[in-house]
Amino acid sequence: MAEGSAISYICIARADSKDVVAQWSASNPAEYRTSVRQVLEAPDFAVKAIPGKRFRLDGSFNTTWFTTDRNKVVWLAMTNKSYPQRTMFAMLQELQDEVNGGSYGSQLQGGGENQFTKKIKPVLKKYAAEYADPAAKDDLTRVMVKVRRNPDLCVGDAGDGICLFVATSSLARAARIRSAR
């Protein structure tokens, strides 16, 4: 999967019934159902799925992210393994706020399998597109991607994740202006 198209699946599920009430996928949603079922049907899921707690599960080829709200609604996404954690959880929170703030929030608790997919899929697709490039949504991620793509911008070894980022001329100019004040 290309770095720019990092999100492959997003769904909203009910923790109590384990029904996926809405979903979007970059390809066939059935490909992701086994992974979603494994998460929702895990023996300790009900105990660990505390509202507001965030989970990251690294698989062989992708990462599954999810959180549960106070209504026991599960907000889940699957990405490539390099997708940044802070950006993904920001997306899930933003999605949760939009859907719960709209006309669907209270209805999700009683929804059955795929009951809201037709209505909510455009919203899920919008978030998948908006967050496809994590560097476009988060300043820290933008710098990390820039360093990863251009190791010559570092003084030191960028490969170990630790380097001194060489300031661009505009950053250096801004620093000089601030220090002159």
Image (cartoon, rainbow, N blue to C red):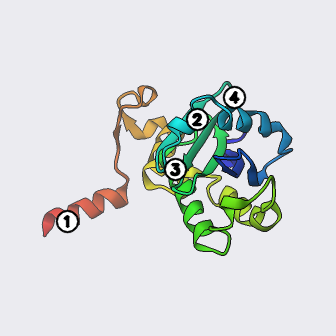
Residue at 57%, 38% (x, y): give it: 46
Q: Alpha carbon of mark 2 to alpha carbon of mark 3: how far? A: 19 Å
Q: Are marks 1 and 4 in contact (CB under 8 Å)?
A: no
Badge nearest the viewer, 4 or 2: 2
Residue at 42%, 31% (x, y): give it: 158
Badge nearest the viewer, 4 or 3: 3
Residue 18 occupies which quadrant of the picture?
top right
Q: Which residue is mark 4?
A: 61
Amino acid type, label 1: Arg
Q: Which residue is mark 2?
A: 45
Amino acid type, label 2: Phe
Q: Of callouts 1 and 4, which one flags the residue occurring earlier in the amino acid sequence? A: 4
Other-residue count near label 4 (Cα within 10 Å), few / some / many at <14 / 14–19 / ≥20? few
Q: Alpha carbon of mark 4 to alpha carbon of mark 3: how far? A: 19 Å
Return the mark for residue 178: 1
Q: Alpha carbon of mark 4 to alpha carbon of mark 2: how far? A: 22 Å
Amino acid type, label 3: Phe
Q: Are marks 2 and 3 in contact (CB under 8 Å)?
A: no
Residue 58 occupies which quadrant of the picture?
top right
Instruction: Label 3, secondary structure: give it.
Output: helix
Q: Which residue is mark 3?
A: 89
Other-residue count near label 2 (Cα within 10 Å), few / some / many at <14 / 14–19 / ≥20? few
Q: Quadrant of the C terminus?
A: bottom left
Q: Of callouts 3 and 1, which one flags the residue occurring earlier in the amino acid sequence? A: 3
Q: Along the horizontal axis of the image, is 165 left or right of 152?
A: left
Q: Are marks 4 and 3 in contact (CB under 8 Å)?
A: no
Instruction: Label 4, secondary structure: give it.
Output: loop
